[in-house]
Image (cartoon, rainbow, N blue to C red):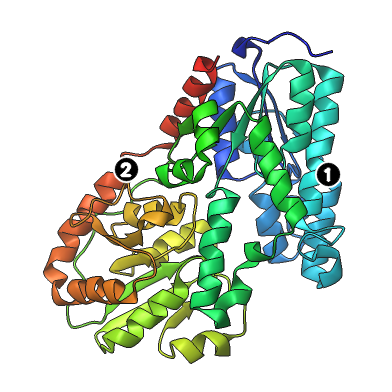
Amino acid sequence: MTAGPVSSAAGLVLAHPSGNQFFRHLARTLHEAGALAEACTGIDWRHGRTLGRCLPRRLAAELGRRDFSAALGVPVTSHPLREALRLAAGRAGLASLVRHETGWLSVDAVYRDFDRWVARRMERRRQGGGVYAYEDAAEAMFTAAGRLGWRRIYDLPIAYWETSHRLLAEEAQRWPAWEFTLESTRNSAAKCERKTRELALADVVVCPSAFVAESLPVEARAAKRVIVAPFGSPPAGPPPRTRKTDAPLRVLFAGSLTQRKGLADLFAAMRLLRRSDVELVVLGSPVAEPAFYRRDCAAFTYERPRPHGEVLALMRTCDVFCLPSIVEGRALVVQEAMSQGLPAIITRNTGADDVVVDGAGGFIVPIRDPRALAEKIGWFADHRDAIPAMGAAAQAAAARLGWAGYGAKILAGWRASP
């Protein structure tokens, strides 16, 4: 028998399998407002620097980013075993264990295990008025919430799967050599059906951008409360400075080195430009050997992934940021680059078109248009004197989006929902 409806005053159970900065900032907002029933994640690293010194540097850094309790001042309940084993298996090269969807320690398996664990915990403790869960880790929680009479808030961090699959299937036809970089095109029917069920069970859907909200099926937009809550930007860096105009224009791309991020289109734009006064800097995690990327663009400068502070410092050595994504939710890296004084060239599908003022803080170009990318990059190369003012406008636009506003918008939507 389903329990009666519970007031939002009872608080939310907030649950994310691996935690991220969105989870972190929302947990803090809910806690400060007295609206957090419980925060749940996979690993809450509480061993600090002492044990961290005994671990490989990259693993210690990954775990350090998951020190939620200390960072938030909020008690966090953790379910660490499966996620810890996944991290270890990935670093040990045990590919079969972490293989997409099928591996016992795949991301999908870890998410499903976490979803079931939180659902059991909800039904056992019965403390809360709603549950806030994320895509691919919500079905069991939402089913349990239905039995408890709780409201169900669904965080959709990227365009709904039907839209994503359509766009990326088209990319596989456009750039067949890059098809293997589009992992979500390999999602099974069972995984897609699970996403469909999660959305059907949700009462409220939280999207980071209008692009994501518009990707929802029409019937879902009509039947559910949809909240668009933009992410916050990091603190502004130093004021943009004028770089020597006799140095090449440094254009930065940052993200996974895939065609979902539009990298093949950016490489095509660089081939069209053929300018010695433009340098492309590529920062991110490769999914192929270096020769694959050099075949399409021999001259770019590669920068390895690094801690967040070092990424911001690298951004300040560049002039322009470029991200021609095909599918995103909201590419936070756009706001990060703008916060450091870089005007941006983006597509609307980055989800950041509300922060990039076309012609002021950067330019918005169509997806799948290397010529438009080449034109805008060439414009910056020809108008170096305009970059400091555009960088200042970009920095001011990014500063208008704060993490406090992100959490407050979600909280207000939760409290207002029937």
What residue is rendered at 66% in x and 12% in y? 10
Q: Report the front residue among 222 and 406.
A: 222
Where residue 373 sits in the image (x, y, percent)?
30, 72
Q: Report the front residue among 276 and 351.
A: 351
Quadrant in the rendering for residue 9: top right
Quadrant in the rendering for residue 386: bottom left
Where residue 291 sits in the image (x, y, percent)?
56, 90
Q: Is residue 341 above or below residue 269?
A: above
What residue is rendered at 61% in x and 37% in y? 71
Q: Residues within 10 Å of mark 1 (few under 14, many from 20)?
A: some
Q: Please give left or right for residue 116 compared with residue 238 in the image.
A: right
Labelled disc at residue 296: none
Q: Amino acid at mark 2?
A: Ala
Secondary structure at numbered mark 1 = helix
Q: Report the front residue among 35 and 164.
A: 164
Q: On the rendered image, what quadrant is the N terminus found in? A: top right
Q: Please give left or right for residue 297 compared with residue 100 in the image.
A: left
Where residue 176 sits in the image (x, y, percent)?
56, 80
Secondary structure at numbered mark 2 = helix
Q: Please give left or right for residue 28 compared with residue 246 in the image.
A: right
Residue at label 1?
Answer: 113
Does residue 176 appear anywhere in the picture?
Answer: yes
Does residue 281 appear anywhere in the picture?
Answer: no
Badge nearest the viewer, 2 or 1: 1
Q: CA distance from mark 2 to mark 1?
A: 38 Å
What residue is rendered at 38% in x and 51% in y? 335
Where residue 156 sits in the image (x, y, percent)?
57, 42
Total numbered labels placed on residues in the image: 2
Q: On the rendered image, what quadrant is the C terminus found in? A: top right
Q: Amino acid at mark 1?
A: Asp
Labelled disc at residue 399: 2
Q: Are marks 2 and 1 in contact (CB under 8 Å)?
A: no
